[in-house]
Amino acid sequence: MHVAVGDCVALAVYLFTFILGLPANLLVLFVYVRKARKRGATPNVVYALNLCLANLALVAWLPVKALETLLQDWMLPAPLCPIYNFFLFSSLYGSCLFLTIVTIGRYLSIAFPISYKRYRRARISCFISAALWVLVLLHLGLGMVAEGGAYFVSPGEGDASACYEHFNASQLAVLLPLRLEMAIVLFLLPLMVTAFCTLRCVTLVWRTCLPAVGKRRVLFVALSTLTAFVVCYAPYNISHVVGFVLELNVSWRREAMLTSSFNVFLEPVVMLIVSPATSHSRICGRQSRLSRMEAHRRHCDTLTQEPVANVRGVPTLSERSKPGVDLTRVSQD
């Protein structure tokens, strides 16, 4: 059985993704479920669990994709083809939207800590998560209309068949505009929002009194999320735009899809970085407590040496509430 170089690369990516993605997402699931049981559900916990479940759904179908690539044939029953693609694309676009909402929450917790804390409720996050899933499933449901009873299974080379590879004119008439709309609504707009929130987070934190180590950590967390967003989702969505312009199903869609599978193990890394155990907000909180302790110690020394000195060693309430001291504490959950 001859396997092309491109197929070997795809198989390597699927294997690598499965080996790293399964334990990584199970670890994230364990960390955040444990967090929810100990301290209760918070917005970050809700969004992280949604991301984790979306990734696990994709990981569960990766062996099927690898088998199809190896055999160059769709061996499963035809009705499973749209089901497979349903889980694949729901994971892709669902993860895209949830990464965006996590970034928005991080920005609001830094820019508007008091106002955001008022609405930072797990129930509200559950409603937002449900709305995002409805948005994704609505688009995918419209895409299923284009199958026309053929389940997107088409003849390949020889006696082989292919799943979601070849489309007739009537299917393309529905899929091409829908793909363009999905690329704009489910990728381009979230990307713009994610980029804005990321840059604002970096700007706000950089202006605070945090030490250089804390600032670098915040910069790393923010930019790693944005980088994962672009690397994972940009190539495949660009293929949607090119396909609509050229009015065809571009031949390199599968190669573009390979980078989308990276989100299965890149997102758990990002979520573990911002998890309660390693969150940059805890560094900020510890730094602020140490600063207050140091200020109090200096105040006591001043009182000992100069009894009549002005008692200004202890920071006032307004000073303690300056940006960069405790404003990121609300983001630790």
Image: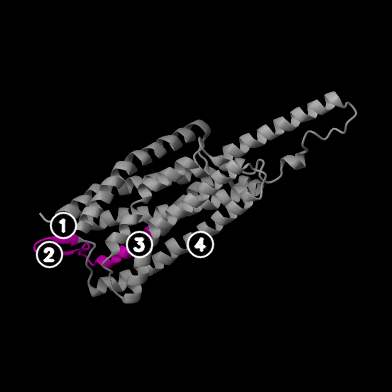
Q: Amino acid at mark 1?
A: Gln
Q: Residues within 10 Å of mark 4 (few under 14, many from 20)?
A: few
CB within 8 Å, label 2 to label 4: no
Image quarter of residue 217: top right
Where is residue 59 shown, x and y percent of the image?
A: 30, 46
Measured Cα–Cα span from mark 2 to mark 3: 25 Å
Give the secondary structure at mark 3. helix
Where is residue 166 shown, x and y percent of the image?
A: 22, 67
Q: Amino acid at mark 4?
A: Met
Measured Cα–Cα span from mark 2 to mark 4: 41 Å
Q: Amino acid at mark 2?
A: Glu
Q: Is residue 282 left or right of residue 229?
A: right
Q: Which tag, 2 or 4, sits closer to the chain's start?
A: 2
**What number of labels is visible?**
4
Q: Is residue 149 left or right of residue 25?
A: left
Image quarter of residue 329: top right
Q: Which tag, 2 or 3, sits closer to the chain's start?
A: 2
Q: Which portion, as a residue range, is magenta?
A: 137-162
State the residue position of label 3: 236
State the residue position of label 2: 157
CB within 8 Å, label 2 to label 1: yes
Give the secondary structure at mark 1. loop
Give the secondary structure at mark 2. loop
State the residue position of label 1: 72
State the residue position of label 4: 192
Say which quadrant the N terminus sits in: bottom left
Q: Is residue 138 left or right of residue 255?
A: right
Q: Residue at x 9, y 64 (%)?
A: 158
Q: Residue at x 22, y 62 (%)?
A: 151
Measured Cα–Cα span from mark 1 to mark 4: 38 Å
